[in-house]
Image: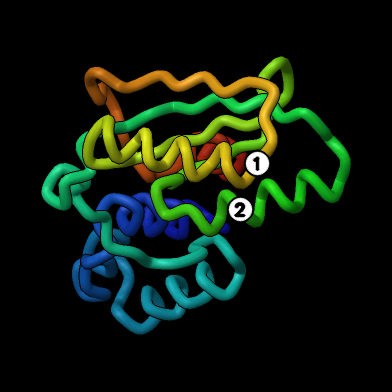
């Protein structure tokens, strides 16, 4: 990993549709070495996949809810079951197992409050909860998929 690799990662995170020619021009390499570096970044797991980001409002996913979940039981079987169930629910676009009072934090997108109610009823039917708290986003201030690479840059400079 060097400064060129980091620059390639930044460029690709911002726009994965850039051609190898455009990328090579930005990092001052010819196309073949640039292409090889990109493939090496993929092979080494720095790039896990390339996706298209869909504008959620254009597809009528207008409501974002942050759902804090506390479950009744914390054994390994329940943790695996919860993970399996959550992975099967398309409205859950992110899920984190947390430390502290909340066991899980879910980011849920739905078209409207009625759709959220259907999601919620489906969820509580499948999982035993001690507590569920939903907070609805009023305004999206920042949303990005770009991972900061400042620590990697600092490591290379030192």
Camera-near label (1 vs 2) is 1
Instruction: Determine the image quadrant of residue 18.
Output: bottom left
Q: Is residue 21 shown above or below 145?
A: below
Residue 69 spot, x, y in % from top left: 61, 27
**Residues at discs 1 and 2 in contact (Cβ within 8 Å):** yes
Residue 135 spot, x, y in % from top left: 41, 19
- Name the residue tied to disc 1: 127
User: Crowding at label 2, few (<14), some or many (≥20) Cα neighbours within 10 Å?
Assistant: few
SS at badge 1: loop
Q: Is residue 19 shown above or below 6?
A: below
Q: Is residue 11 left or right of residue 91?
A: left
User: Crowding at label 1, few (<14), some or many (≥20) Cα neighbours within 10 Å?
Assistant: some
Residue situated in front as seen by the camera: 154 or 62: 62
Q: Residue at x 32, y 32 (%)?
A: 64
Residue positioned most to the right: 75
Q: Residue at x 46, y 36 (%)?
A: 120
- Name the residue tied to disc 2: 85
* Nearer-N-terminus badge (1/2): 2
Residue situated in front as seen by the camera: 109 or 143: 109
Q: Is residue 29 shown above or below 6?
A: below
Residue situated in front as seen by the camera: 154 or 114: 114
Q: Is residue 117 left or right of residue 5?
A: left
Q: Quadrant of the N terminus?
A: bottom right
Residue 48 spot, x, y in % from top left: 51, 64
Say which mark, if any, is on residue 71: none
Q: Is residue 28 visible?
A: yes
Q: Is residue 157 visible?
A: no
Residue 89 spot, x, y in % from top left: 48, 53
Q: Quadrant of the C terminus?
A: top right
SS at badge 2: helix
Residue positioned most to the bottom: 32
């Amino acid at each position: 990993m060097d400064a060129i690799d980091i620059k390639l990662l930044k460029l690709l995170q911002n726009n994965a549709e850039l051609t190898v020619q455009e990328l090579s021009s930005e990092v001052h390499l010819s196309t073949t070495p640039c292409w090889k570096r990109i493939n090496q970044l993929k092979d080494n797991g720095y790039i896990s996949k390339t996706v298209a980001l869909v504008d959620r409002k254009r597809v009528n996913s207008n409501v974002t809810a942050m759902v804090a979940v506390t479950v009744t039981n914390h054994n390994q079987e329940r943790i695996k079951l919860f993970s399996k169930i959550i992975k099967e629910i398309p409205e859950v676009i992110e899920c984190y197992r947390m430390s502290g009072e909340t066991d899980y934090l879910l980011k849920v997108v739905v078209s409207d409050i009625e759709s959220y109610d259907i999601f919620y009823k489906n969820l509580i039917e499948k999982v035993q909860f001690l507590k569920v708290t939903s907070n609805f986003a009023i305004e999206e201030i920042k949303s990005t998929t770009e991972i900061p690479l400042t620590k990697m840059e600092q490591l290379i400079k030192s």
